[in-house]
Image (tube, rainbow, N blue to C red):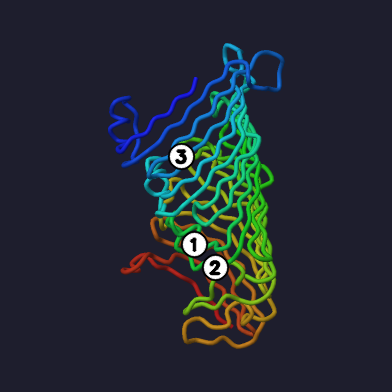
Amino acid sequence: VELEVRGDDIASFRDILGLPGTAEGPFSLDFSFEPGAGTGPDPGTYDRATARINSSLGTIALDGNVSSDERYAGSTALIDLDGLNAAESLGILGLPGLGPTPYTVDGRIEIQAQGLSIERADISGLYGVEATASGLVGWKPLDGDSALSIELTGSDLEQTLTPFGIEWPLASAAFSLTSGVRATAAGIRLDELLLTVEESRLEADALIPLTADLAGLDVTMQAQGSELTDIFRPGEALDVPPGAWSIASHIRRVDSRLLMENTRIALADLELTGEATLPWPFEAGNGSFKVEGQGQDVTTVLPRLGAFELGRQAFSLSAEAQVEEGTWLLQPSTVRLGDASLALSGTVDRLPDFSRTNLDLDLE
């Protein structure tokens, strides 16, 4: 069977067949089907089928081998998609911040008993990223059969994340990301995630529940780098300290709390350890924390704060507090800077009234 369709208005053709879509104007469709002419991984008969569609949105070509299995197991297809306008053709998927840029999708898929096997799929042109995926997407994707490996590379971290509403002062730096992605009964698991930005790297394993409250969220992460400026641009009010840095933490969602445990931060001359508990859903002005830190030169961490420049001197911090509706309940805490020492404890009421403030200070 060979079929050719040409027309001046693809919208009218879609209306006739009751098909969705956004393409307009001239189009062409070429389709062929040849029984017994295909090949496949398993014994049996395979038919050959090809299709090619051209429209104002681009071109998609399929070259497949259709098995005789009643569920089409063993069928394979090569997919080649050249899109002309990502915003127009993919906007229906609800992806944020897509521009009218060209993009491509190339891959090979195989129908298996457990699901759709992706031998390799390459995606280019979306969000300034080159992406590759392989693995299995189960017929019930969230029931445990799905497992994928993904790779992403990009030349500008800030450009890639801005469409997702992330407006941090990120550097225009090259980056890459690799991870395993598995569906489990508890949620989506990310295995051996590795994000590199210039010379900095982040490693993580995570369980992300597919529930609105993220009950059961569990993330273990560690990151390190030679310079924070690999990731962040220096700001006007706060310099980004030079030098090596690292961070590690275990983040869990338990009951109605978000726990940050075994947190360790090293930044320039600062060494910091601590833990924090936040309410979930997050409420500003509530939570608790415990932190200890020290360093030999405060200027390596805070070279300046606005127009105020700090002198070169050793520092340390030991603090513990609970925050309830904006009121701080400060346990006995100590801050040392050079030869000065400040011990404090008590209650600091929220702005602007300070009516319940009862704070003990001891400065030496």
Residue shown at 62% from the left, 78% from the top? 336
Q: Earlier in the sequence, mark 3 or mark 2?
A: 2
Front residue of this view, candidates 214 and 295: 214
Q: Are marks 1 and 2 in contact (CB under 8 Å)?
A: yes
**Could you tell me the amino acid type at mark 2?**
Ser
> Could you tell whether 183 is left or right of 356 in the image?
right
Marking on residue 213: 3
Q: Which residue is mark 2?
A: 172
Identify the element where label 2 is drawn.
loop
User: Which badge, 1 or 2, comes first in the chain's sequence?
Assistant: 1
Q: Nearer the viewer, residue 260 or 24?
A: 24
Which structural element holds mark 3?
Answer: loop
- Given the image, on which type of amino acid does mark 3 rest? Asp
Position of residue 306 in the picture relative to residue 71 (left or right): left
Mark 1 lies on residue: 159
When asked about the image quadrant of residue 19, the answer is top left
Question: What amino acid is at disc 1?
Answer: Gln
Please provide percent x and percent y for residue 65: 61, 24
Numbered disc total: 3
